[in-house]
Amino acid sequence: MTSTTPVNAGRATGTPGTIGGVAGAPPAARAAALLERVTGGADSAPAEMTAPFTGLPIATLPQATDADTRAAFAGARRAQPGWAAMPATERQQVLIRLHDLILRHQDEVLDLVQVEAGKSRLDAFDEVAATALVAAYYGKHSARLLAPRRAAGVIPVLTRAGEVRHPKGVVGVISPWNYPLALTAMDVLPALAAGNAVVQKPDNQTALSALWLHELAERAELPADAWQVVLGRGSRIGDAIVEESDYVCFTGSTPTGKHLAGQIARRLTGYSLELGGKNPMVVLPGADVAKAAAGAVAACFSSAGQLCVSVERIYVHESIREAFTQAFVRRTQALRLGATLDYSAGMGSLTSAEQLDTVSAHVADARANGATVLTGGRPRPDLGPLFYEPTILTGVTERARLFAEETFGPVVAVYGYTDVDEAVERANDTPFGLNASVWSGDQRHGWEVATRLKAGTVNVNEGFAATFGSVGVPMGGMKESGVGRRNAAEGLLKYTESQSIAVQRGFRLRPFRGMPPKLWAKGMTASMRALRRLPGR
Ligand code: NAP
């Protein structure tokens, strides 16, 4: 079965004076105003970015030099002590105000995210929702999570022990282009909540979305300079970021993550890496086929598959493979593609020409190596320069690049299996371990299979949104998908230094004067035997 997708939600018309020439987008002057928030810009070669929907210019972006970047860190370092000295409950209030502002002013940033990243409005709304959820979570919980903690001391009553959390100092955050608003929020806001200052390098392609949040944070009364934004290619300013940061939070591809980890290791500072994936979905026998098919559409084609946690491999039990595949193809063909700043389209465009090249090359290579295209499989220049149809493949062989490599586009391979152990083994047979999805008619069984999948997040009867939105649990990658976690307590505490303090009273932890050491050791041995039985130790 080979067919094309009847997609027709419309093409963006070039409109002079708007950002990216996209009809309905904010005026170009708004981009210029946001860009005034950037620190530095002395590089003699500014970057020209274009809108995926139209191919027309978004803005000319000032680029930082190495010296500009170090100056941004110096400014952040000056601002940090004052911000850290503020009670954590007051810092929380900034995030709560930010949460309210995000929801109130979402229309403008929905436009910006769509114009810069080329995604559908619903996919852009996912970013607004994630941003608000993160702001609310740390706005409500960070003071409690950061509060000093008492612990049992070595000698009950006489040793008072506790743990105190200090901010790292200035955190360097490097962000990719695919979720420019949400990833800015998920990585920058907890760093600020912990009392750090931040220097962020968003991707040039999507800098305006990050700057929009920066502007709103200032309106929420974040002190000026506590969060600085620099723009520039990693190859130009990456060294300065690594050398000046007290902690680096990187989100992007696995090769860049490995390169940065090598650099950071030489300084012995902390880091977290949120990297790539090749995320599997396992449909168990007895799963609701219609729900699994609908879930697969969202899991594979949200943000045109340019989502780190999106599904690129589906393993379906043979007993339901045919029914699932038919339903999946049907629902995919019903997806409307479009380039308009409203909710009429189900899927948008790819973001860059490089992405279009990779997606086209992966599909061509899979075909050449025996795969069949069930739907999609071609670019759609009639809708916009970077559109590519949502594509379902079957019969993908191990020779195909996309069998194991991340495509990061709207392309998924469907495979059959006969035994659940085999499905788990094949799902785990990858160097990556970011996200996974399990579909089951029995939630307990779904949970049990989830625990056997080697991925940092696993969604049962959902593709990715259940864990992505549950910011009270950590998110991150196993294996080559990352180091460390974002969200929840871990996503905050990674930005702190833990300090243990113990106050000793009335009893030295050494033999009393004149006491034979052997007798001391004997007494301590008896004490430890008794202490082990004490509750709470
Ligand atoms: P990328 O090429 O690694 O770039 C990510 C960011 O790092 C960009 O801002 C990039 O800027 C910067 N960068 C590149 N080289 C650098 C260097 N030497 N020093 C400092 N910064 C440097 O990744 P991408 O292609 O933009 O993003 C897609 C990848 O990110 C996919 O693999 C996806 O799975 C992954 N991702 C993971 C998560 C997650 O949470 N796990 C989330 C989103 C995306 P320049 O390109 O301008 O240099």
Image: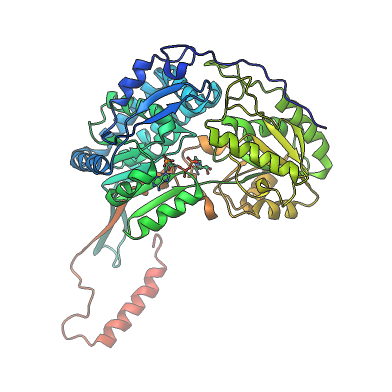
View extreme (left): residue: 513
The answer to whether residue 511 is above or below residue 368 is below
Task: Give the residue at x 42% y 21%.
Answer: 103
Of residues 458 and 65, the one nearer the viewer is: 65
Horizontal side, residue 381 vs residue 533: left or right = right
Where residue 159 sits in the image (x, y, percent)?
25, 64
The answer to whether residue 65 is above or below residue 254 is above
Task: Give the residue at x 64% y 19%.
Answer: 382
Judge whether residue 95 can be spotted in this image: yes
Quarter the C terminus occupies: bottom left
Of residues 146 and 203, the one nearer the viewer is: 203
Where residue 8 sits in the image (x, y, percent)?
67, 17
Q: Quadrant of residue 353?
A: top right
Horizontal side, residue 41 vs residue 348: left or right = left
Of residues 45 and 9, the one nearer the viewer is: 45
The answer to whether residue 38 is above or below residue 317 is above
Horizontal side, residue 267 vs residue 308: left or right = left
